[in-house]
Image: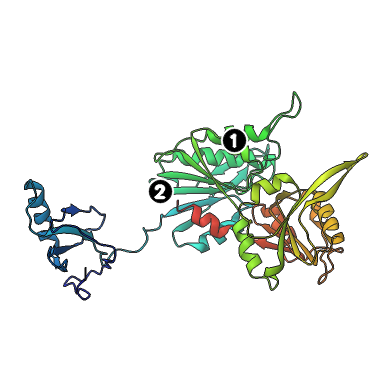
Amino acid sequence: MAAKPPLQSSSSSAAAFSLKNLSYKCPKLPSLLFKTKSHTSITIRIRCDARDQNLSVRFVPAAAATNHHLRSMQNSPPSPSPSSISIPAASSSSSDSSPSKKVSLFYCAETKPLAQRIAAESDSIELRAITWRTFDDGFPNLFIPNAHGIRGQHVAFLASFSSPKVIFEQLSIIYALPKLFISSFTLVLPFFPTGTSERMEDEGDVATAFTLARILSNVPTPRGGPTSLVTFDIHALQERFYFGDNILPCFESGIPLLKNRLQELPDSDKIAIAFPDDGAWKRFHNQLQHFPMIICAKVREGDQRIVRIKEGDPRGRHVVIVDDLVQSGGTLIECQKILANHGAAKISAYVTHGIFPNRSWERFEFDNGGHPGAGLTYFWITDSCPLTVKEVMKKPPFEVLSLAGSIAAALQI
C-alpha cells in the first residue's frame, strides 16, 4: 500500500499525520469520528482500491466532515463510498500545554525567602503577605489583607513548623484561608516536623506524627474540594496513611535535586551512595538504583552501638551518605569515619531536612580538598528548614539545594 505525497491544507492550522501503520483488508472502511477539545478539525478521506490496494488521501472541510459523519451514522448498513476519519488539528491559538494555573501564595516570616524563589519560578504564582502581630499576652493577632480579593482563586500557604510556638499561629491562617470562598487550597509544608515520632514503643508513648496528621486532616474544605498537602521526604513510609480523607497528601522528594547536582560533579562517574541504616535504604534506593550502593548498620558492642559496613565497597569512590534528615549528626559522623577507614576517596552527605538543633551543624568539618577522614567534601541540604539555611549559608561544606522549582511545579497540579 502506498501513500500519496505530503498533503497541503488550505487551513492555517497545521497537523501531522502518520499513515505508516495503516493496513486494510477490504475496500469498505468503517466511519470513525474522534471527539477532541479542539474547535478546528481536518478530515482525511481515504479511498482504498480493492484491486491494487492503492491509497489516496484528501482533505475535506470540517463542516463537510461533520455532515458526512452524520450521514454515515444515519445510513445502515454503511454505503461502500469512501469512509471519513475526523482528526483534530492544532488551532493557531492553542498551545502544546494547558494554561498555567494562577496561584496566590501566602507565606510566614520564616519562609519568605523560599516563597520569593518559588514566585520567581513561574509568572502564574503571585505572592500575598499576611500581617503577623501579637497581643500583649503573646497570643497571635493576625490579619489577611484584601481577603475579598482572593475569592474564587487558587490559594496556597507555605508553612514552616519549626517550633511549637509558631505552629498555632500558622494553623490559624491555614484554617482561615479555605473559608474565604477560594477555589482551592494547597498547604505546602516542606518538612513534616513530628515525623520521627510516628509509633509507640511502650505503653504511654504519644505518636505526635499521628496527632499533627489529624489536625491537618481537619482543615476546612474550600469550595473546589479537599485541601492538598505538599510535603517532602516524610520520615516513615507509613505516615502517609495517617491522614484522613479531607486532605490530599502529595508526597514529593528532594532526591531529584541531589541527582542533578551529582551529574555536575567532575567525578560523577565515581559516585557511590551510602545509606546509614536499612530505613534510609528502603526510602531511597529505588530513586538511586543506578549508583553503586553501600549499606551501613549499627551493631551493639557491649554498651556501645557502632556503625559497620553491611554491604558494598567504598574503595576509591566519592561516597555520598544519603538520609532524609539530620539532627545531632552523630550517625553521619560515624558513617564518615568507617567509610574513610575502608578507602573512600571522598565523602559527602545529603539530607533533605537539615534540622541541626543547638547548632549541631558545627560538628561537620570541610575536608579541605580530599581528606575524607578530616571532613566532608560537600554537605547538601534543601531549604525545607529555613532557620538552618540562614545559619549554614556560604559555610563549607554546606550547599543548599532549593525546593523552589519542585514546589512551583506541585502548585500546578
Toward the top, the furthest residue is: 203
Name the element at disc 1: helix
- Expressed as whole percent of the image width and height from the top left, the position of residue 52 reads 14, 68
Please say whether residue 282 is visible from this viewpoint: yes
* Residue type (three-letter) at the residue carrying disc 2: Gln
Which colour style is shown? rainbow
Q: Earlier in the sequence, mark 2 or mark 1?
A: 2
Per the image, label 2 sits on a secondary structure element best described as loop
Which of 211 and 321 lies nearest the eye of the viewer? Answer: 321
Farthest residue toward the right?
302
395 is higher (above) or lower (below) than 146? below
In x, y percent, where is residue 263? 63, 68
State the mark number for residue 378. Answer: none
Q: How many marks?
A: 2
Which residue, given by chain and number where applicable, does mark 1 sit on? Answer: 213
Q: Is residue 397 above or below residue 304?
A: below
Q: Position of residue 164 (x, y in %)?
A: 69, 39
Marks 2 and 1, how far apart in space? 26 Å
- Residue 299, percent across and down? 85, 43
Looking at the rendered image, the quarter that the N terminus falls into is bottom left
User: Horizontally, is 210 left or right of 25 in the view?
Assistant: right
Q: Residue at x 67, y 61 (%)?
A: 400
Task: Give 215 or 176, whichever is nearer the viewer.
Answer: 215
Question: Residue at the front extreme?
Answer: 51
- Please name which of the two marks, 2 or 1, marks the residue nearer to the observer: 1
How packed is label 1: few (under 14 Cα within 10 Å), some, or many (20 or more)?
many
- Snapshot quadrant of residue 36: bottom left
Q: Residue at x 54, y 34 (%)?
A: 217
Q: Which residue is mark 2?
A: 153
| Residue type for callout 1 | Ala
How packed mark 2 is, by other alpha carbons closer than 10 Å (few <14, some 14-19, many 20 or more), is some
